[in-house]
Image: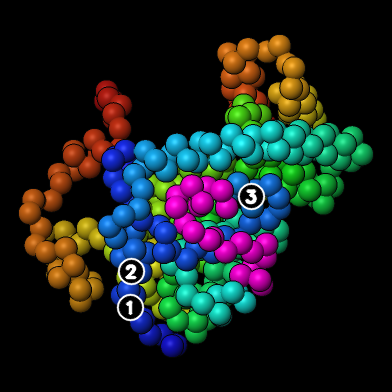
Amino acid sequence: MSGMVVKRRPEKRLDKLIWLPGGRTVEAIEADIVARMEALQGVCASAIRDKVQAIVRLAAQAPRPPRPDDLDRLYTLSNEAIGLSGVADLEDLGLAALSFCRLLDGFRSGADWSRAAFDVHLAALQLLAQPDSAMGAEARAVMVEGLHTVVKRATG
Amino acid sequence: MLELDNKTRLNLEQARVLLIEDPQPGAEILAQVFFGYGVRQPVRCVSPDEAMARLEEEPFELIVCDGDLPGGQAYDFVMRLRRSTLEPNRYCPVILLSGHTPSAYVAKARDCGANFVVAKPIRPMVLLERIVWVCGDNRIFVELDSYVGPDRRFQSLGPPPGMEGRRKGDRDAVGEASTPNLSQDEIDGAFGKSKKVEL
């Protein structure tokens, strides 16, 4: 194949199937999925809180600044938390986890270590993970916005 | 991006869908989403190796893979699949799912031969829109030494009017230009409001 460009137009098999008569309306699909996701909400909420606990434990054991291995493990846990946040109905927690991922990725990519930025993310994750938190939606949104600002300042 | 009408009917009953997701409960979420779409029996794998073994056994119409698998396994998997001799699966649309999605990740996903990246947390109706978009995607499949997968150029706008173009198929693909070239002011305007400078 050296130096050559081969172009193909493969059969669009999925496109042929998806428009076949029958099937379900988008409305019916959405209703079905909402019911399925509600059934998983409790499991996911519990799993995402476990992830936050694991993050906090790992961060407590890690030196300051954390070693590259620690940053990788924290990043992985935080990234997994993002994936669960939608079904768990804990989207603010997911956004805080996303912000933490951005911060950790910044450290891994050479941004100067910031203990304050790191610790404020841990505190926010714990607070947002509390099942009986008295914080309102507005306060949670302000907190998440604040984390984004912290990351921008810390990582440039 | 495409928006689906509530009354649109979609039929995924016969679609064979391969899901690669680890760990739990992420895999369960993804499977339930596809059951909700009407897929009868999505095939669930927890690793790229297990997925490759399934891809050797039967044809699939769609592959959805967790892009956050450790060690960049998702990219390696897509690259391996695209360069394999597994017909027709090597042409199968691949959607990668990813939590934190920096632009470098999107570039990597594009360069490994994936069709689309969808950010987590999954919003099932957004993912469905992306699947329908992938169905109608008319990009050709290209094979080079350095890349195998769907053409990485999403748009083919063709050469400017009056120019021949550098590629044989330029004019066939997009037809003759219907409007004149943009003026410099129009180009500048497309980049936002310019600042006035007094001399």
Tell me the CA gap for discs 2 and 1: 12 Å
Residue B42 covered by magenta stretch? yes
Image quarter hosting the C terminus of chain A: top right
Q: What element does badge 3 sit on?
A: helix
Judged left or right of residue B68, residue B96 is left
Q: Residue A65 occupies which quadrant of the picture?
A: top right
For image coordinates 39% across by 68% down, the residue present is B150
Looking at the image, the residue that sits furthest to the front is A22
For image coordinates 79% across by 37% down, the residue present is A50
Q: Position of residue A46 (x, y in %)?
A: 75, 34
Placement of B25 over or under A56, stated as above or below: below
Magenta segment boundaries in residue numbering: B31-51
Q: Position of residue B99 (x, y in %)?
A: 60, 45
Q: What element does badge 1 sit on?
A: strand
- Mark 2 vs mark 3: same chain? no
Q: Position of residue B165 (x, y in %)?
A: 19, 68
Q: Name the residue nearer the viewer: B40 or A46.
A: B40
For disc 2, the chain is A
Amino acid at circle 2:
Lys
Amino acid at circle 1:
Arg
Amino acid at circle 3:
Glu
For image coordinates 9% across by 62% down, the residue present is B176
* Nearest to viewer (mark 3 / mark 1): 3
- Mark 2 vs mark 1: same chain? yes
Residue B126 covered by magenta stretch? no
Q: Please name the residue that numbered disc 1 is placed on.
A: A8
Q: Please name the residue that numbered disc 3 is placed on.
A: B28
Q: Please name the residue that numbered disc 2 is placed on.
A: A12
- Residue A102 shows in the view: no
Query: 10 Å neighbourhood of mark 3: few (<14), some, or many (≥20)?
Result: some
Tell me the CA gap for discs 2 and 3: 28 Å
